[in-house]
Image (cartoon, rainbow, N blue to C red):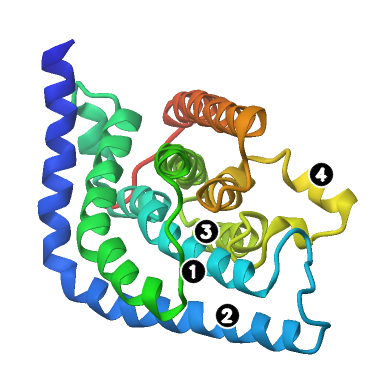
Amino acid sequence: MTGTLTLYLEFTRITFIKMLAYRLRYYTGIVTYLVFVAGNAFLFRAIYSGLPEGTVIGGFNEAAVVTYIAVAWIGRSLTFNNVDRELATQVTGGNIAQNLLKPIDIQAMTFFGALGEALFRFVLFTVPISIVIVPLFHVGAPDAFSGLAAALSFFLAFLINTAINFIVGTFALHLKSIMGLVRAKHVVMELLTGALIPLSFFPDSWRQVVEMLPFASITYVPVTIWMGMRQGEALVQALLVQVFWAVALYGLGVALWRHAIRRTTVQGG
């Protein structure tokens, strides 16, 4: 068991080192994320400025919604990865054949590799972005308990996001090119995760449906935990829902992958 874990942790280490070759892209990404946060923050400030002072929408006043947007994008810098695109590239390039011949679990290898990317992004992307965004938009720190709970929640969000990306990536074994599917997934997740606007801004009927989906657990749940908006039973329930989706989506990925490799053909080589 220890030997197996050591083997897969090696994929984490290798991915971290490999990502160092692309560190300049993450430096420019700091500017990109700053533009996204600033644009959304200015938009919401303009909306609230036309409303009576102290107006609360969906549980957020002006300062709270700006904090939400800032923390959402900081969290996104950590949980985001390109597992689906990488699987698609392996299929179209023929490299997937070599991996299938190895005595390893492809899904576990992918997750541990994504963990290496997440660690890299934390050090060279999330921390620098936080240093810029937090003071600029007056993002307050959570209390110790909410901070620890949010850290766990963001880790679960990473697992859920990676599981969804792996599921999308498995379709490359059937479709060969999934770039259209990846772009569609990206657009849908921007809205349904709550990265663009808090899900509490949705009409109640829509919000109740969206919160039942796994996407809410990627951004909306961890950010609201960070902001101290989930306490006691509500906090425990939110974390349990995230655990459920992480396990369920991983299991779905296992089933889809096993089905896909039985009928796959390899391009390139």
Task: Say above or below: 180 vs 244.
Answer: below
In the image, which is nearer the foreground, mark 2 or mark 3? Answer: 2
Query: Picture quarter containing residue 240?
Result: top right
Query: Picture quarter containing residue 47?
Result: bottom right
Task: Say above or below: 144 vs 88.
Answer: above
Separation of residues labelled 4 and 2 (CA atoms): 25 Å
| 82 left or right of 55 in image | left
- Disc number at residue 70? 1
Q: Which residue is mark 4?
A: 208
- On the image, the x and y values in percent for residue 159 come to 43, 38
- Disc number at residue 41? 2
In the image, which is nearer the foreground, mark 1 or mark 3? Answer: 1
Q: Nearer the viewer, residue 205 or 225?
A: 225
Crowdedness of circle 1 by 10 Å Cα count: few (<14), some, many (20+)? many
Mark with earlier residue (4, 1): 1
Q: Secondary structure at mark 2?
A: helix
Mark with earlier residue (4, 2): 2
Crowdedness of circle 2 by 10 Å Cα count: few (<14), some, many (20+)? many
- Disc number at residue 182? 3
Label 1 near label 4: C-beta < 8 Å? no
